[in-house]
Image (spheres, rainbow, N blue to C red):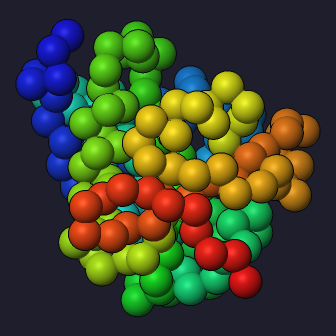
Amino acid sequence: MPADDVLIRQVKRDDLNECFLIEAACYTTDGATKEKIVKRIDVFPEGFIVAEVNGRVVGFINGGSTCKEDITDEAFKDMVGHDSSGTNIVIFSVAIHPEFQKKGISVPLLKTYIELSKDLKKSKILLICKDDLVKYYGRFGFSYMAESNSEHGGFKWHEMGLLLNEDGAGTEPNRP
C-alpha cells in the first residue's frame, strides 16, 4: 500500500473504539485502557493523530506535554502532570493495526508527528522503546539517551529523544 493512500489527521472522539482496539492488539495487557485513551483524546487532542486508510483508522500516535525530562512516570500516561505549554512532547503510543504493519504507515505518521510537534513549538520529542525499535527511531533522527528505569510490562526500555530545530535533524537532547 503506497503511503499516498494514508490520510493522517487529528484524532476525533469518534475514533476512540478503533484506537482502543489497535492499542490492545499491539500492546496486549500492557496497553492503555479505553479510559486512558479517551482522557488523552479529551485533554490533548492536538498531540494525538491517527492514520486512516479507506476511511478506517489503522494506526495512531499519542502523547502528552511536559517541561520535565523524566519520561518514566507512569502517572503521566494518565495525563497527570500534563502541561499543554510544556516544552517537551512525550510519546505514549505508536501503534499500527497488525493487518497494516510493515506497509509503511508508521513513516508518514511519525513524520507528521514531528512536524506537528514543531508547529506546537515544542523543543523535544521524548519516548521509550524496546531494544528492537532503537534503530528504527534513529532513522527519524531520534538519539539514544539511556537505558530507561521503566519496568513497564517487565521489559527493558530505552529512552530516546529528538531535538526539534529548523532543519528537523535530531541531536542528542541535553539531560539535566
Residue 92 placement: quadrant: bottom right
Tell me if residue 95 comes above or below residue 11 in the rendering.
above
77 displayed left or right of 13: right
Q: At x 87% / y 58%, what residue is drawn? A: 149
Q: Position of residue 84 (x, y in %)?
A: 41, 84
Res 145 visible: yes
Residue 114 placement: quadrant: bottom left
Look at the image and tell me in which quarter the N terminus lies. Answer: top left
The number of discs equals: 0
Q: Position of residue 97 (x, y in %)?
A: 43, 23
Q: At x 82% / y 50%, what residue is drawn? A: 147
Q: Position of residue 56 (x, y in %)?
A: 22, 27
Q: Position of residue 122 (x, y in %)?
A: 38, 77
Tell me if residue 72 comes above or below residue 56 in the rendering.
below
Q: At x 77% / y 55%, what residue is drawn? A: 146
152 displayed left or right of 98: right
Q: In this view of the protein, which residue sits in the foreground, 159 or 145? A: 145
Q: At x 49% / y 75%, what residue is drawn? A: 88
Res 19 visible: no
35 displayed left or right of 141: right
Tell me if residue 31 comes above or below residue 98 in the rendering.
below
